[in-house]
Every structure is written in C-alpha cells, then in structure tokens.
C-alpha cells in the first residue's frame, strides 16, 4: 500500500474504531480517540485483499524466540496462547536461563497456562538457538526479542536452515522520526540507522517471507512493565500526576492480546509477505487522558498537573514520565485492511479497571514508595 492509500485507509478506519466527533478534541479535556483532523465520514475499510488472502487454515510449526524482560515479553506469551488455541504446534524459546529471577515475574510465572495448551517452553540465547533446536523444522519463526543484527541475525539464519517459509519480526514504532502530522503510517520516515530498521531491511533480503510489526505501549493480563502502574502509584496515594507539556499529545496503549492476534493473522497469510504493520489498537489516548482514565480506574478524582520540562532542566523527562512527551501515535489501518484484523480489547477504560484490580491484588497500592523526582518537579514549578 502506498502512503497516500494508507492515509485514506486510516481515515476510513475511524468508523471501525468508533471514534468520537472531532469536536471532542477542541479542548484540553480530550481523552481518547483519533486526531482532531480526522474525517467524520463513516465508511468501511476495504477488505478485498484480506478476504482473498486469508490464512489457509493449515496448522503450522511455529518457533517464538521471546525476550526475557520488558513489555514485549507479554506479546510472546499472548502469541503462544493465540496460536496454540488455533491448533498450531508452538515452541516458546525464552532468551536467557530458566533459573533467572526474572522468570518469577509475569508473564513467565503464567507459563503453565500455555504449557497446558501444548506449548513447549525452552531457554536459549539467540546464538544458541541453532544448537538448542538442532535438526528441528519450523514453518514459521517469530523473533520477539532482538533489536539489532547481533541478536536477530542468528535467529534469522536458523530460520532459513530450519526450512521456515515465514519470519515474523516484532520491531518497534519507536523507529519513526517525529512527525507534525500524526498518526504514523508505514510509509513514514524512520531512523534508518536504528537497530530495528537495519534488521527490517536485512530480512527483506532473505529467502523467506518476512513481515515486521511495530508496536508501541501495551497493557493487559501478564504485563510486567510499568505503564498504567506509574499512574496508579500516584493516584492511590493522593499525589498529583505530573504530565509534561499540554497533555494533549496523542499516544497509543494496546492490550497485548490484540498485538498477538495481529501477528497471528499473518501466519500462513501470503498477503503479509514483505509487509510492515503498525501493531497498535484503533484509538489513540492523550497523555492527560491516560492519567484521567487511570485515576478513574482507581476510584479517585484525577489530579493532573501539566508542566513545561524546560522549567525543570535538572530532570530528564524520560526518567520522570513513562511516555514520550510528544505525539507518538500510529495507525493500524493497514493491518485492518490487509490482515482483516480488529482488536478484541478496544475499550482502554475497561482494561485499566482490570489492571487496577490486579494492581491491588498484589498489594502494590500499600507498598512504600518514594517520589523524589516528582517532588523536585513540583518545587521547580512552584506547586
């Protein structure tokens, strides 16, 4: 799809996302939805390609090389659940060692769920994958770990040797260059020297069908990286939630299962060959909106304070806030049109309520915490 067609597909996909009227974004009270310039015309994304090129339904042997930390680990967990649930033969290869203390955290502590579905779990680093799976044959290899050629290269080489016809790479929307015209679509400029971009370019030279998926922030059952928890920590303790900038910046928070179902839709699907997909949900959320939704999920009134990071030069924004303080929002219109994908969890507010219930169940709301950075910002802005 050309960039112009992707923009058109994004505009048409707004009806599927059930976005609010553009007037919702006329003030700083906007919370969730699409850019203010979005069309109000309610039409349907063309799905001819997706219908014509659905996955064959043939059961595949799939190897998932999964990271042992960070938010992306949960994508692999949900992908294994999704593929095993569809009858595929799935092997989950976690990077690192089985006795690593990280394995006590979610999603690894939930692995009995996927083992009960027939998923095989093993541990091996990227440069050990070939020896760990010597002699094995796989139809599809998924790399949900690497960020550069040093880590992805050995896995891709093994995929070719193992007879795989598909290689699916979990990349990152972070490779896009900032744009004044969000959302990002797959034709937008990227940081060409970034590890993910170099890997994507290399995969296109291999003798197999590659696809790349670019996720952003994620949430949902099994997550272990602070996202909504950062907001909950402050809301339940009666502290203000400090948001850099106006708070109107658009971002994207997607349930891990929705990321997994998009990737799963590419398995055995020729329409995905050679394609790159933004792996995100169908609606955006503003930074202030995320703070407000998290506070409401916690049952408290939102207390959001916006500030200019320039007024606090001694504090790095990336250390003071869990999101990028700019518009960082991608369109999933291409995946909807090409893969016939749609999210199972489009209601972020509902998902955050579930996440808060889990947050309380593990006692994090009672944990002693220090907010030195927050206090430093408050002092600097006179609050």
Image (spheres, rainbow, N blue to C red):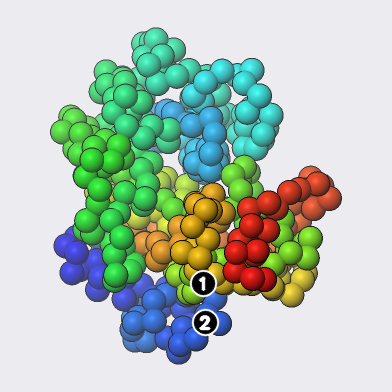
Please name the residue that numbered disc 2 is placed on.
Answer: 28
Q: Position of residue 127 (x, y in %)?
A: 37, 16
Residue at disc 2, secondary structure: loop
Q: Residue at x 44, y 69 (%)?
A: 250
Compute the Cα span from label 1 to label 2.
Answer: 7 Å
Circle 1/circle 2 CB separation < 8 Å? yes
The answer to which of 285 and 255 lies nearer the viewer is: 285
In this rendering, would 8 be left or right of 383?
left
The answer to whether one can see residue 128 in this image is yes
Q: Residue at x 28, y 41 (%)?
A: 194
- Tell me the quarter of the image containing the N terminus: bottom left
Please name the residue that numbered disc 1 is placed on.
Answer: 247
Residue at disc 1, secondary structure: loop
Q: Tell me which label, 1 or 2, sits earlier in the chain.
A: 2
Q: Position of residue 254 (x, y in %)?
A: 51, 57
Q: Is residue 190 above or below residue 9?
A: above
The answer to which of 281 and 28 lies nearer the viewer is: 28
- Tell me the quarter of the image containing the C terminus: bottom right
In this rendering, would 231 be left or right of 370?
left
Q: Residue at x 36, y 62 (%)?
A: 330
């Amino acid at each position: 799809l050309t960039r112009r067609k992707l923009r058109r597909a994004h505009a048409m996909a707004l009806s599927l996302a059930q976005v609010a009227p553009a007037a919702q974004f006329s003030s700083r009270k906007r919370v969730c939805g699409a850019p203010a310039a979005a069309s109000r015309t309610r039409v349907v994304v063309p799905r001819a390609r997706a219908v014509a090129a659905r996955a064959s339904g043939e059961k595949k042997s799939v190897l998932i090389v999964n990271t042992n930390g960070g938010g992306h680990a949960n994508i692999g967990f949900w992908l294994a659940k999704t593929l095993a649930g569809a009858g595929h033969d799935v092997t989950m290869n976690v990077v690192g060692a089985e006795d690593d203390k990280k394995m006590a955290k979610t999603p690894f502590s939930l692995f009995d769920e996927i083992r009960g579905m027939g998923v095989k779990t093993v541990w091996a680093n990227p440069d050990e994958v070939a020896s760990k799976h010597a002699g094995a044959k796989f139809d599809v290899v998924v790399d949900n770990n690497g960020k550069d050629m040093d880590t992805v290269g050995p896995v891709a080489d093994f995929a070719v040797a193992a007879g795989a016809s598909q290689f699916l790479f979990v990349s990152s929307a972070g490779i896009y260059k900032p744009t004044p015209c969000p959302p990002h679509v797959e034709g937008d400029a990227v940081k060409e020297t970034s590890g993910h971009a170099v890997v994507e370019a290399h995969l296109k030279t291999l003798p197999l069908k590659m696809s790349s998926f670019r996720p952003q922030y994620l949430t949902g059952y099994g997550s272990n990286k602070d996202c909504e928890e950062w907001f909950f920590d402050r809301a339940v303790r009666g502290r203000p939630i400090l948001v850099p900038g106006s708070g109107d910046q658009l971002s994207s928070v997607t349930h891990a299962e929705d990321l997994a179902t998009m990737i799963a839709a590419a398995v055995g699907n020729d329409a995905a060959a050679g394609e790159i997909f933004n792996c995100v949900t169908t609606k955006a959320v503003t930074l202030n909106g995320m703070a407000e939704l998290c506070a409401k999920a916690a049952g408290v009134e939102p207390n959001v304070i916006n500030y200019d990071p320039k007024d606090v030069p001694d504090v790095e924004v990336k250390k003071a806030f869990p999101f990028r303080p700019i518009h960082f929002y991608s369109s999933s219109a291409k995946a909807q049109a090409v893969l016939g994908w749609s999210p199972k969890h489009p209601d972020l507010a509902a998902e955050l309520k579930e996440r808060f219930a889990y947050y309380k169940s593990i006692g994090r709301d009672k944990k002693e915490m220090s907010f030195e950075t927050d206090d430093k910002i408050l002092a600097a802005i006179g609050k």
